[in-house]
Image: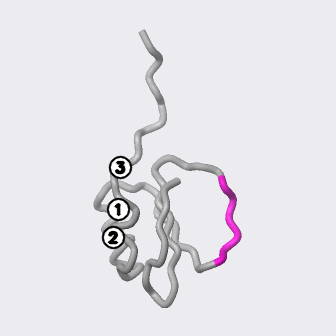
Amino acid sequence: MAPTSRTPEPPRDAPESYVGLDAEGAEQLARTRGWSVVRTLPPGSIITMEYLAGRINFEVQDGAVTRCWLG
């Protein structure tokens, strides 16, 4: 028998569907779709590159999501 993963699978979602939404609305939508961690960052932020299952990242400028990626 193959070992089972202990890491929960992240929601199946299309990151591009958040681009153009206002930041607050995008965060609420992401949480309703099952994301446990929603990270909002200004453009050009210095961040670590570790992958975290269950996290969605929003780059926000002038209150709107301009980029979105998983992990």
Seen as rendered, the residue at the extreme bottom is 62
Residue 68 screen position, x and y as percent: 47, 67
Give the residue at x 45% y 50%. 54
Sequence-wise first label, 3 or 1: 3
On whether residue 64 falls in the magenta region, the answer is: no
- Marks 3 and 2, how far apart in space? 14 Å
On whether residue 45 falls in the magenta region, the answer is: yes
Give the residue at x 45% y 87%. 63
State the mark number for residue 28: 2
**Foreground tag (3 vs 1):** 3
State the mark number for residue 31: 1
**Front residue of this view, candidates 50 and 36:** 50
Contact (Cβ within 8 Å) of mark 1 with mark 2: yes
- Up-down: is 10 above or below 47? above
Contact (Cβ within 8 Å) of mark 3 with mark 1: no
At mark 2, the secondary structure is helix
Residue 3 screen position, x and y as percent: 47, 17
Give the residue at x 30% y 58%. 33
Residue 58 screen position, x and y as percent: 49, 70
Going by the numbered disc 1, the residue's amino acid type is Arg
State the mark number for residue 11: 3
- Marks 3 and 1, how far apart in space? 10 Å
Which image quarter holds the N terminus?
A: top left
The magenta stretch is 44-49
Contact (Cβ within 8 Å) of mark 3 with mark 2: no
Give the residue at x 44% y 22%. 4
- Marks 1 and 2, how far apart in space? 5 Å
**Foreground tag (3 vs 2):** 3
